[in-house]
Image (tube, grey):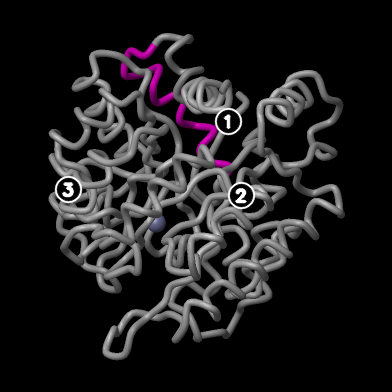
Amino acid sequence: MFTIDAHLDLSMNALEWNRDLTLSVKEINAREEGLTDKPDRGNATVSLPALREASIGMVVATQIARYVAPGNPLPGWHSPEQAWAQTQGQLAWYEAMQEKGEMIQIRDRESLEAHISLWQNGESQEKRPIGYMLSLEGADSIINLSYLEKSYEKGLRALGPAHYGPGRYAQGTDASGPLGPKGRDLLKEMERLNIILDATHLCDESFWEALDHFNGPVWASHNNCRALVNHNRQFSDEQLKELINRGAVIGGALDAWMMVPNWIKGVSMPREMNCDLEKVIDHMDHICQIAGNARHIGIGTDLDGAYGREQSPYDLETIADISRIPGMLEKRGYGEEDIRLVMHGNWLRFLRKAWSV
Ligand SMILES: [Zn+2]
């Protein structure tokens, strides 16, 4: 079934992990044998052929680069200008993939509809490019607001103001505090440009302030539920209700520590924690129970988001395994139409509405 994954850090993997995503997952991992510079070496699950294998014909693909002030222990750049340049390198990779016929940018109604009909009516799967819509994860690299318009012109259509830790425009996961005037100005400019607000990673205080001040379209590209795994990275039921009221779609994420409780990073292993793919259905179903329907969930795997198989469901070998999700939904009593909504229909409805103006 045609599937949309609303969160993949593809260019980060290409540039920072040095992965050639045109190869198979097996080939990528073979090339990493013996490498120890990152904890997930040899554990990749994502490649462009694996996406095609599962009919994941469209992704929301990130640009991502953090600014870190002195004393911030997180990895990141020492100036916003360096962070900006990193995101432009990432963009150059997406554009090179487009030149090669591997990917194609989706930036408006026209390119969206053309791409959907290509995947519905196209010839053999191998030949089809993966559609990518650009999203910026963390706004630190926006040197000043004029850079947001520059980014929009290059195709940026969604933005999460924060990532992990303190940000220049908003506070993220494990941090705390408000947006402040700079963050509110960013939201205003996003509204003017019709850039989607990705609520994922906003700390609670920044989340509520952002939703109070932003009148444009809101989604959460990769987010699970606090009621099932209690952590500030996850949404509380109150946050989920607000998002549902705003017409948001929330992408179920496959980062193991967000799927099962009591995960200890770097120590816990998926099998011993009983983390299988089915666990994401629990989170998605929780959102459906709150909404009273299946119109607010989608897929936002975040696979290879700086972790690999060591922190993914144990029954997932590559991203192609998400093609098992329709069967899992069916087993839980979801009908054919609802399954179609979850795999792509909700994201499509959201984008068609956001881009109808
Ligand atoms: Zn993330």
**Could you tell me the amino acid type at mark 1?**
Thr
Per the image, the residue denoted by label 3 is 229
Give the main secondary structure of the magenta stretch.
helix
Q: x, y (%) of residue 324? A: 49, 32
Q: Residue at x 21, y 61 (%)?
A: 263
Quadrant housing the C terminus: top right
| Horizontal side, residue 120 vs residue 147: left or right | right
Residue with the mark numbered 2: 152
Q: In the drawing, what numbered circle is on residue 3?
A: 1
Lower position in the chain sequence, tag 1 or tag 3: 1
Give how far across and how far down residue 203 sits, in percent: 21, 55
Which region of the structure is painted magenta? 320-334
Question: Which of the two labelled residues, at mark 2 and mark 3, occupies the earlier sequence position?
Answer: 2
3D distance between C-alphas at marks 2 and 3: 35 Å
- Rendered position, 321 above or below 2: below
User: Residue 302: image x %, image y %?
Assistant: 45, 52
| Residue at the image position 65 percent from the left and 54 percent from the top | 47
Residue drawn 16% across and 53% down? 205
Earlier sequence position, callout 1 versus callout 2: 1
- Ligand 1 is found in the corner quadrant, namely bottom left
